[in-house]
Amino acid sequence: MSNGNFSAEDGPPSVGRSLQQARIAAKLTVEEVSATTRVRIPIVQSIENDDYSRCGGDVYARGHIRALARAVGLDPAELVARFNEGRGDAPAPEPAAPVFEAERIRSEPRRPNWTAAMVAAIVAVVGFVGFTLVSGSGDGSAGPVAQSESPDPDAEPDAVPDDAASGDDSADDAAGEPDPSQSAVAGAPADKVTMKVVASGASWVMVTDANGRQLFQGTLQDGDSETFTDDDQLDLVTGNAGAIELYVNGKHLEDIGDPGAVQRLTFTPGDPEEG
């Protein structure tokens, strides 16, 4: 036996044979399964023949098996377990996943709260001015403020200089907002698949979930971004891959395709898996 296949005498059919039989029983063609799962037709045909050389590695092979199993009504977990057994792998998560989790939940260094510091400074200055006024009127010392019998209604009140009074806005600008990609990384739930799409140019984009339900379809312009989350799977189709940056499950995917290229991608809660 090779590639984890089972003979009829030894047990159930191989993973590829099971997928093929279920597809035929469901009266689905290879083309229909490919359109539903975003897995290319040659890869579907190879997997049904228990040939995983086109998948680009076991991680991607597992992702394709899950997608195909859902499309033909089989249990993805059972088929992946049989695949692992046939490949001699333990059914544990990929090594990259624990490392990714450890990196993802690491807390960001806290930035100084300049707004609070500026407010405290203003309160201190106002308190000092008030104390000076009270002290000056109490000991009878001659001073421009103490000698004034009544306040001039047209006079400007004692205040902090204009550049200091505007410190709240400048402090807010200095503190800044966290980078959108870092927020998406830190907020990605461990048991779901999260995908953030950021456009660096105009690109048509369509996103669907594990049930084929359309979550988004339209054109993103330069600077636009959209974030999507699903329990099982997210499928992305983009008409200008070179103008799209992806953040999937807290990981930045670089160079998903050339400018003007149509790209179809599939992702699950594990490592990013390309369809």
Image (cartoon, grey):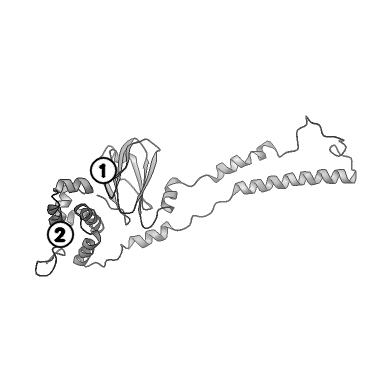
Query: Which image quarter holds the N terminus?
Result: bottom left
On residue 263, which mark appears? Answer: 1
User: In the image, which is nearer the foreground, mark 2 or mark 1?
Assistant: 2
Q: CA distance from mark 2 to mark 1?
A: 29 Å
User: Regarding mark 2 in the picture, which secondary structure is present there?
Assistant: helix
Label 2 environment density (alpha carbons within 10 Å; few <14, some 14–19, many ≥20): some
Q: Residue at position x 63%, y 41% from top?
A: 167
Residue 72 placement, left or right of 150: left
Residue farthest to the bottom?
A: 10
On residue 18, which mark appears? Answer: 2
Amino acid type, residue under disc 2 in the picture: Ser
Across and down, in percent, residue 102 comes to: 41, 61
User: Regarding mark 1 in the picture, which secondary structure is present there?
Assistant: strand
Q: Is residue 50 visible?
A: no
Q: Is residue 114 visible?
A: yes
Amino acid type, residue under disc 1 in the picture: Gln
Q: Residue at position x 48%, y 57% from top?
A: 107
Across and down, in percent, residue 69 comes to: 21, 56
Q: Residue at position x 77%, y 43% from top?
A: 129
